[in-house]
Structure formats: structure tokens, C-alpha cells
Image (spheres, rainbow, N blue to C red):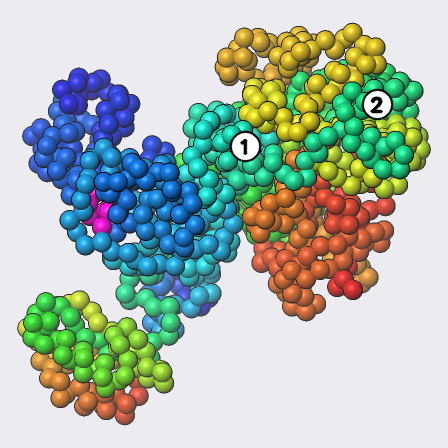
């Protein structure tokens, strides 16, 4: 197709709008409502063009190019029309500053006068200088507004976390409404009322907190005015620097742009070029980076315990002290906890340090709580390698999706976007969850199973697959017969009794799965948290083989895949995470090196404890030395996201205080212990060595990685598919009179190193406090509890504290609490169980009772 | 409410029909109805709110026993509809769009009822009163007060 725009001949392929083509060719057409990632809207009318032999002035954002079109974008007639249209828009937007002849000289004063309640001009607006409306006024050279100004005098909405909504500045472009509906699937805002009363709002004008908003900030990022304004930068000036990094808060690995002013982080935004996130982020990446890096809980000086107290000392002194002490502990009596939050290079060094200097195989980290390592372990135990070579975007191509054990719009918001894309393209979504999830709106079928009965559900579905084909042919996959036999105990007449769903619902799910082409199974910690977690995963695995589905295990921490690749070939002789913690309290271990978060080690019986961390935590009271590590923002390195993508990240700011990057600390310690194996001057040198040594990185070239090319860790497949026989399990979690509630856990991603994000940030605390104990409305009423009231949850072997959160989505008799490693011990669900962790990294579902705190 | 729900297939395009039925059944759209519709039709609550505040036919507050609608279309307007409206407002002690405190009357305006030849028009509980004069206002109100509310169509 050939078209001409402003005399320029352009070749176009496919169905494209005039505006898209013009943008691509660098031809500027003013527009306010259009956004490259959203559907055309045609609201602002600024992008009008003239097309030869067509009447009128069609908007280029919603007119598609046709062969032979001759388009003009900036005739005097068009410019005049645009000016008039813009004047109309401006008549309802504070415009005095926009057209003020003094605006050039006004700059110096604006930051102080911004603290007024009402924004009546640009100098009072926090968006001054980054406003698209300003830009358009500038290009169209508007110097007067001939229509009467209207100030709508709407109340500014300041009650929600993170951003204010001042609809007096709104030009009703609808970008926020569209991004929320089309891209994020939340639809928390909509146009409400009509005509001159029309405004963007929520149901019954409720706060965003009560209208399904996930606070991803996508609306703030697309707003062309100051109507949606991030509160954190309200009184800040424009940034003087911008840097890119990889978000450290989950296994998606979103690319973020960080705005800086004088080496301080102002805000973080999703990067448009992010390979995974493409201009989207979630509440953590969008609003929490600044607070985490500049947290008042940061430790900025090395500390050692000389007498009774921890004292601030120089690095020299601290390193010598630790090196001297560590020399005394070798082999079995020392262990090291690494961290899935720090870079691959640093995890590689920690392992190297443990084996070469500490001569111990006791190295592990909390990454094992994630479903990904769990299914990987299971596969290895059964003698095959799991195919982990997938990309997140494969999910959007699936035709049927089966989701269990996670509320992904909350836990993995960027992964949810891929699911949403699939659903928008007509995919069927099956959800199995005991609680009602916001994404049910997009599901074809919601199986409200009894908590913890996923195993039964999968097995019953497998059984139906066998029933379907009486003369079942062995599809040539190993383990077929023994699997078939192991399902013998599942009596289909007991479906309802065992899982809480009806036979009809089961059949419906089966039909969806049987007819599925390109099915994708997504599963989260809801499956793996139980003592029978391995059985859950095995049952899901079998079902996936029958339905020919791909499995996507959801991860927790950002670099868990990195930790898993780096530790992949190490022997399993050493103690694992739980065993290390148990050995620390039993006295089996004499020394412990903590470079990653662990629960409070109150009962630890250690001679020497080193903590290398960025944040103050409870274990400091037991520590003999504390080495202040910098955060991701202060160092270079590589993270590997859940799909195995290696992503380099660069230092954004200099290390705060005396904090040092983890790789530096380990190298220095090793050198002081007499090693010559740690001569690294920068992380790149470590990267080079690491990709040579680690088998999963064998196909990777350093040059590709450095240039930011698409680089994946690869798994070599040995033997891949095999059915696994399932064991019939008795879900031994019967409630009793004494403990009438079941506590289900949400493995929370809201932590970074030893910082619980919701305890650091007020906004996140309002959305989801890690100290909430969720109670169903029925139970709240029965027990006469109030929202926010402090309660104690008790099991037969322990207790913990929390605050009542009434949650409509919970069935009665079930409580919900979040589990994260960095929570203070009194508020941590760890309090419920006798030993720090049970085997298999699982807390499971625990029968409990609740009472008011006295 | 369940009954209304059950009469419709649960597809999103039924939203307006559902709202209409709820409106005529309850005289308004109760807030909890929004979340129920949201769950059944799989439309977000904010989107439903957007639809129901767009149309004048739906209200979030209960309407009075009697509904008086004044046509403010062009033809009625030039033939004195504003004076009729004024008179109703004065007599009932409420403004257009409001409901009297005793919940007896709701006064509304509408932009054209398509009977311009009869203007100015007032519609009282479904009865059309054409070529209204201000002195007839009192009569209509008195009549309504005596009558029981006719069942709405």
C-alpha cells in the first residue's frame, strides 16, 4: 500500500491508522487522547487531517490508511481548527499559566507555591514540565482562550494511596479508563454521569481502594495532564538524570526507568522498551523503589559485637574481624544462606566462597519456597529434566488456561497481562480457588474447591480423561499404567464430598480441558505450600500431560531462577534451607553466614553469626557482625527472571553511606582469608567467569549479554515426559471444636531482602498489609470482630498476632494470612508451628482458633 | 433480585434490560444490586455505574410515590414549560430532580416526549396532561394525593 503524507511517499503494510504511520515516520500530529498501546478513541479531535477527495476532517487516530491516500497534516485550515478545538478543551482546564506571557520567568518560584489546595494554573501543578497538554499548547502556539473559563470545582480525591485525582484538570481523554479496562483488566474507573457532568470516576464514587484498583499506576503514566498526580513527587522538581534498572521485587523482571535528582531516587516508571513489561509495572515497581532504596531501615555502617553491643566500625576492622573468626569454622559446622534477591554474580560468589573458603556444602536460600524449584526438584527426583524453556508471552497465545494456587492480578500483575491478552483473544480461563478472585470476571469457569483439595480435583479430572477413552491407548509416555492404576482409589461419586465442587462442574472443566488446544497451566504457591505439595504438583503434571498443556510455575523472588541455575549442579549433600535453620537451633551448626533473609532465629545456638544485609532486622540482636550491603540500585549485575531471561542491570546511584555491594564484601572477605580466587574488580569480571562455569549458561556469550540482546538460560533436555504415580492422601487438616478455623496462606512477594514492604510503605499497607488476618464477613459478625482489631491466632503449637481484615472473598471458617520471610516474629505465621519450618518448605493449612488480644 | 436475574441469560449485553427491570421493580437501583450484576454479568462495578449514571431512566435513590415529569423540549419550552415547572417546584417545595421529604413526589424534567403539538406537557404517573396552564398544577397534585399510585408499566 502506498500513501502520501505531507508530500512524503510512504509504503505501508497491514491495517494501520494514519496517526500510527505518521508517528513511525516522524511526522508530528498533535493528539491528546490517543496512546500507542490503547485502542483508538477519537475523543480530542486534535489529530484531524485532510485527505484528498474525502470530505471533512477525519481524526487520524481512528482512520485507517488506504492505498493511494494523499494526506495533509498541517494545512493552515487544520491548524486553525486545532487551535479552536484546543481552546475548547482549555476552557475547562486551568489555563492562565498556559497562555501567560510571563511563563518563562515564572519557573524559579513554582516549587514553593505548589503547596496550595487548588490547582488553578501550571505553576501550581505537580505535572508542570512533564505535561502533554502543555506540549500541545506549545506546538500549536495558543496565546488566548476565547471561551469563558470554567472551573468545575470538583473535590480533589486524596484519600487513596500513591496518587491524587484532581478531575478539575481532566480533559476527559479517557486514556486512564481505557488503560484500566483494556490493558490491565481492572476496570476500576469508568466515565460516569454524562454531558457537562461527565467525569472519570468509580462505582458510587467510592475510593479506589474499594473499587478493584490494583494501584499499578498505569493510569497515572498515561494521563496527559496533571489530573492524576503521583504524590511522592508532588513537591519535587524535575529530574536531572534518568537511569534504567530491573525491578527487584518479583520473578517477572520488569525494566524500570528511575528518575533521579541529585543522586536521590524521585520515582520509578515502567520502561516502554522492557522486554517483559512493555510499558507496564505493578504497584511494587511503580511506587515502592524509592522507599525501599532510601528506607530509614537501611544499615549504612559495618557493625561488630566487641563487648555486649553492636558497634559501628570501619570496613577494615569489620572485614578483618569476620575473616579472622570465619577461619575457625570449616565444613560441617558452618552454613551459608544466600539470597534470591541479589544478582547471579553475587550468588555465584557466595557459592564459590562457601565451597572454597568455608569448605562447606551447606548453602541454600529461600528460593525453594517457589513453585518453580519445587517442580524442578520433583522432576529430578523422578529422573528427568523439566522443560523450563518458555517465554511469558507464550501464555498470551494459549487457548485454554487453567489457573490454580495464586491470585495473579495481585501476586504477578505483569503475568496477568499475558493471561488477559489470551482471554481477550477468546481463550477460556478455568480458575480453581477456594476464594473468590477479582479475575473471575474473566473466567469461563470458577471451581470453588475446598481449601487444599487441588490434588483431588486434578486426580478426578485425570480419571475422567481415562474414562473418556475406555480403550485408552498408551500415548507412549512412561509411567502410564502405574499412573492409571494409582487413580483406582478415586471414586467419582465422592467428588462433591472431597472437593466441594459438583460433578457437573467437574464435567464442565473436563470438557474445557479435553477440547483444549494450546493449553497453559499456571500454578502458584497455593499448591506447593502444603506438606502434600509434591503430590499436588505431580497430579497437576499428570493432568497437563493428558491435556497436552504447558506448565508455567509462578515464581516468587526476582532472581530465584538465577539461584536455581547456579546451584543446579551442586551436590545435594549439604543441608537445605530448613535443615540449616534447624541445625542452627539444635547446636549442630557453630557458625552461620546470612546473606539472605531468614525468620527470627530466637532459639539459635551459634558461636558466630554474620549478617550481610541492607536492612535492620530482628536477627541483629544475635549477630556478631553486620556487613551493610547495598541494594540493587547501587550495583551492577544480572538477574534471571522466571522464564530464564538474563537481564543486566546497572548501578543507578552510588552506594548509600558506607554500604558496599555484596560481591565486593564477599571478595574482600575471601581475600582476607587468604584466597587468590577472588580478584574481581567489578561485576563484569564475575559474569565472565560465571557463564563459563555454570552449565545452564553454556550457550551464552558475554558480548550478547553486555549488548542487552535476548539471552536465555537453556536447559538441555534429557528424558522429558513421564507420568508420575500419585499416592492417595488423606488431607489431615480436620478442624476441631478447639481449633474451628483453617488458616490458608498467601506466600507474599512483598518483601525485599529483610524488609517487609508493607511495613515500610504506608500506601502498600493500605492495600495489603502483611499483618492482616483475613476473616470472612460471616465469621467477623459471629465473633463480633471489627476491622483493624488486633487478634491472636493460635494453633496447637504456637501463635501469632495480626489485625482483622474483613474479606468478602473468603468462605466462612477459613482465615487468610500472608507469609513472608521478613516479617517480625510476633506477626509472622511462623509462630504457628513448632520448628522453624517443616520439611519440604511447607507450612500447609493449619487448624487454628482466634481471640482478641488482651 | 434473584428473580430478575434469572430471567436473563447472563451475557453482558443484557445489562440495560436488567437495570430497567430493577428500576421498575424497586423504583431505583439499590447499591448492592450493582455488585450482584457485576458478578453475574462479569462487568466491573465501575463500568455498570458508568452506564446507569449515563441514562436518566435509572436512579440510585428511591423515587417518590408519584412521578411528575415536565417536558422541557423546544416546543414546550417556548410555550411556557419553564413556568409550569416553576409552579410545580413551588407547590411541591422541591427542585427538579428531587423527591419530596414525605417521599410522595418526584419531579423530573425531560428533553422531549415527542408530543410537541400538545405542549407544554406534564406527565403525572403516566397520564399526559397537554396544553398545561399554571392553574392546573394544583389540581394535578391534589388528584395525585387522593389516588393510589397506579401500577407502573
- Please provide percent x and percent y for residue B149: 30, 84
Q: Is residue A263 above or below residue A95?
A: above
The image's mark for residue A264 is 1
Label 2 vs label 1, nearer the camera: 1
SS at circle 1: strand
Looking at the image, can residue A102 be seen? yes
Residue bearing mark 2: A322
- Please provide percent x and percent y for residue B57: 28, 66
- Give the letter of the chain under mark 1: A
**Which of A96 and B2 lies nearest the eye of the viewer?**
A96
C-alpha gap between disc 2 and disc 1: 32 Å
Q: Residues within 10 Å of mark 2 (few under 14, many from 20)?
A: many
Q: Is residue A306 above or below residue A740?
A: above
**Which of A109 and A488 lies nearest the eye of the viewer?**
A109
The image's mark for residue B84 is none
Query: Magenta residues, as a range?
Result: A85-91
The mark tally for this picture is 2
Q: Quadrant of the C terminus of chain A?
A: bottom right
Residue under the point 75% across and 54% down: A801
Amino acid at each position: 500500500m502506498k500513501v502520501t503524507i505531507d508530500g512524503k511517499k510512504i509504503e505501508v503494510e497491514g491495517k494501520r491508522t494514519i496517526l500510527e504511520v505518521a508517528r513511525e515516520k516522524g511526522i508530528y500530529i498533535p493528539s491528546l487522547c490517543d496512546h500507542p498501546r490503547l485502542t483508538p478513541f477519537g475523543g480530542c479531535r486534535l489529530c484531524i487531517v485532510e485527505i484528498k477527495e474525502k470530505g471533512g476532517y477525519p481524526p487520524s487516530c481512528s482512520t485507517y490508511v488506504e492505498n493511494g491516500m494523499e494526506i495533509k497534516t498541517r494545512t493552515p485550515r487544520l491548524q486553525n481548527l486545532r487551535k479552536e478545538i484546543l481552546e475548547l478543551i482549555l476552557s475547562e482546564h486551568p489555563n492562565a499559566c498556559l497562555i501567560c506571557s510571563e511563563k518563562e520567568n515564572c519557573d524559579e518560584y513554582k516549587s514553593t507555591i505548589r503547596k496550595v489546595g487548588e490547582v488553578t494554573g501550571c505553576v501550581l501543578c505537580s505535572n508542570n514540565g512533564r505535561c502533554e497538554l502543555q506540549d500541545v499548547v506549545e506546538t500549536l502556539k495558543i496565546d488566548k482562550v476565547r471561551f469563558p473559563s470554567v472551573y468545575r470545582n470538583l473535590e480533589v480525591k486524596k484519600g487513596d494511596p500513591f496518587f491524587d485525582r484532581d478531575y478539575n484538570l481532566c480533559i476527559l481523554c479517557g486514556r486512564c479508563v481505557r488503560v484500566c479496562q483494556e490493558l490491565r483488566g481492572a476496570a476500576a474507573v469508568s466515565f460516569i454521569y454524562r454531558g457537562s457532568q461527565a467525569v472519570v470516576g468509580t462505582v458510587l464514587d467510592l475510593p479506589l481502594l474499594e473499587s478493584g484498583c490494583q494501584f499499578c499506576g498505569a493510569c497515572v503514566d498515561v494521563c496527559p495532564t496533571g489530573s492524576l498526580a503521583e504524590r511522592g513527587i508532588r513537591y519535587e522538581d524535575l529530574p536531572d538524570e534518568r537511569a534504567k534498572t530491573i525491578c527487584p521485587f518479583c520473578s517477572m523482571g520488569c525494566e524500570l526507568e528511575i528518575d533521579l535528582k541529585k543522586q536521590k531516587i524521585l520515582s520509578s516508571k515502567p520502561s516502554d522498551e522492557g522486554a517483559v513489561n512493555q510499558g507496564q509495572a505493578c504497584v511494587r515497581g511503580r511506587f515502592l523503589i524509592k522507599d525501599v532504596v532510601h528506607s530509614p531501615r537501611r544499615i549504612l555502617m559495618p557493625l561488630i559485637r566487641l563487648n555486649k553491643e553492636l558497634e559501628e566500625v570501619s570496613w577494615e576492622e569489620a572485614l578483618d574481624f569476620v575473616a579472622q573468626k570465619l577461619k575457625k569454622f570449616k565444613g560441617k559446622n558452618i552454613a551459608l544462606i544466600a539470597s534470591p534477591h541479589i544478582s547471579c554474580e553475587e550468588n555465584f560468589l557466595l557459592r564459590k566462597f562457601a565451597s572454597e573458603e568455608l569448605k562447606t556444602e551447606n548453602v541454600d536460600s529461600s528460593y525453594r519456597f517457589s513453585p518453580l524449584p519445587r517442580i524442578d526438584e520433583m522432576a529430578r527426583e523422578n529422573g528427568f529434566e523439566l522443560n523450563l524453556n518458555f517465554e511469558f508471552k507464550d501464555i498470551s497465545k494459549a487457548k485454554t488456561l487453567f489457573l490454580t494456587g495464586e491470585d495473579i492480578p495481585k501476586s504477578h500483575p505483569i503475568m496477568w497481562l499475558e493471561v488477559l491478552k489470551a482471554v481477550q483473544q477468546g481463550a477460556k480461563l478455568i480458575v480453581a480457588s477456594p476464594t473468590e478472585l477479582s479475575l473471575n470476571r474473566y473466567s469461563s469457569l470458577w471451581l470453588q474447591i475446598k481449601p487444599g483439595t487441588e490434588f483431588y480435583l486434578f486426580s478426578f479430572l485425570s480419571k475422567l480423561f481415562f474414562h473418556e477413552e475406555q480403550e485408552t491407548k498408551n500415548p507412549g509416555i512412561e509411567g502410564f499404567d502405574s499412573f492409571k492404576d494409582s487413580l483406582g482409589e478415586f471414586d467419582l461419586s465422592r467428588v462433591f464430598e472431597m472437593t466441594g465442587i459438583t460433578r457437573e462442574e467437574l464435567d464442565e472443566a473436563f470438557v474445557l480441558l479435553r477440547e483444549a488446544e494450546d493449553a497453559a497451566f499456571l500454578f502458584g504457591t497455593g499448591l506447593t505450600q502444603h506438606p502434600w505439595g509434591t503430590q499436588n504438583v505431580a497430579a497437576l503434571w499428570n493432568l497437563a500431560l493428558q491435556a497436552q498443556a504447558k506448565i508455567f510455575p509462578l515464581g516468587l523472588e526476582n532472581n530465584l531462577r538465577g539461584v536455581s541455575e547456579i546451584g543446579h549442579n551442586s551436590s545435594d549433600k549439604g543441608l537445605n534451607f530448613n535443615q540449616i535453620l534447624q541445625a542452627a537451633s539444635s547446636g549442630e551448626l557453630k557458625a552461620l553466614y546470612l546473606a539472605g533473609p531468614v525468620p527470627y532465629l530466637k532459639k539459635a545456638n551459634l558461636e558466630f553469626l554474620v549478617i550481610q544485609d541492607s536492612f535492620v532486622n530482628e536477627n541483629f540482636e544475635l549477630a556478631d557482625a553486620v556487613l551493610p550491603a547495598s541494594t540493587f540500585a547501587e550495583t551492577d549485575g544480572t538477574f534471571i527472571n522466571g522464564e530464564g531471561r538474563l537481564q543486566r542491570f546497572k548501578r543507578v546511584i552510588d552506594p548509600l553511606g558506607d554500604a558496599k555491594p555484596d560481591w565486593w564484601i564477599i571478595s574482600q572477605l575471601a581475600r582476607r582469608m587468604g584466597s587468590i580466587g577472588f580478584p574481581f574488580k567489578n561485576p563484569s569480571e564475575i559474569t565472565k567467569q560465571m557463564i563459563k562455569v555454570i552449565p545452564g549458561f553454556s550457550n551464552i556469550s558475554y558480548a550478547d549479554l553486555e549488548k542487552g540482546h535476548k539471552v536465555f538460560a537453556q536447559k538441555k533436555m534429557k528424558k522429558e515426559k513421564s507420568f508420575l504415580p500419585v499416592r492417595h492422601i488423606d488431607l489431615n487438616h480436620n478442624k476441631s471444636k478447639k481449633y474451628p478455623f483453617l488458616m490458608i496462606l498467601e506466600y507474599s512477594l512483598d518483601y525485599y531482602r529483610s524488609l517487609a514492604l508493607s511495613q515500610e510503605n504506608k500506601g502498600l499497607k493500605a492495600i495489603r498489609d502483611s499483618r492482616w488476618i483475613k476473616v470472612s464477613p460471616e465469621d467477623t459478625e459471629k465473633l463480633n470482630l471489627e476491622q483493624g482489631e488486633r487478634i491472636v491466632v493460635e494453633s496447637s503449637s504456637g501463635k501469632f498476632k495480626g489485625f482483622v481484615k474483613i474479606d468478602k472473598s473468603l468462605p466462612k471458617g477459613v482465615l487468610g494470612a500472608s507469609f513472608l520471610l521478613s516479617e517480625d516474629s510476633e506477626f509472622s505465621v511462623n509462630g504457628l508451628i513448632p520448628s522453624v519450618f517443616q520439611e519440604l518448605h511447607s507450612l500447609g493449612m493449619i487448624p487454628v482458633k482466634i481471640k482478641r488480644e488482651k | 433480585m434473584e428473580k430478575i436475574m434469572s430471567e436473563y441469560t447472563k451475557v453482558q449485553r443484557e445489562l440495560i434490560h436488567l437495570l430497567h427491570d430493577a428500576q421498575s421493580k424497586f423504583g431505583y437501583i439499590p447499591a448492592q444490586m450493582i455488585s450482584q450484576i457485576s458478578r453475574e454479568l462479569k462487568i466491573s462495578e465501575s463500568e455498570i455505574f458508568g452506564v446507569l449514571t449515563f441514562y436518566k431512566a435509572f436512579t440510585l435513590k428511591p423515587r417518590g410515590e408519584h412521578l411528575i415529569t415536565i417536558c422541557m423540549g423546544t416546543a414546550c419550552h417556548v410555550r411556557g414549560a419553564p413556568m409550569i415547572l416553576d409552579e410545580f417546584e413551588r407547590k411541591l417545595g422541591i427542585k427538579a430532580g428531587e423527591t419530596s421529604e414525605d417521599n410522595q413526589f418526584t419531579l423530573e424534567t425531560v428533553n422531549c416526549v415527542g408530543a410537541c403539538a400538545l405542549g407544554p406537557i406534564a406527565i403525572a404517573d403516566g397520564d399526559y396532561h397537554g396544553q398545561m396552564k399554571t392553574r392546573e398544577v394544583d389540581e394535578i397534585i391534589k388528584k395525585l394525593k387522593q389516588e393510589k399510585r397506579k401500577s407502573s408499566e
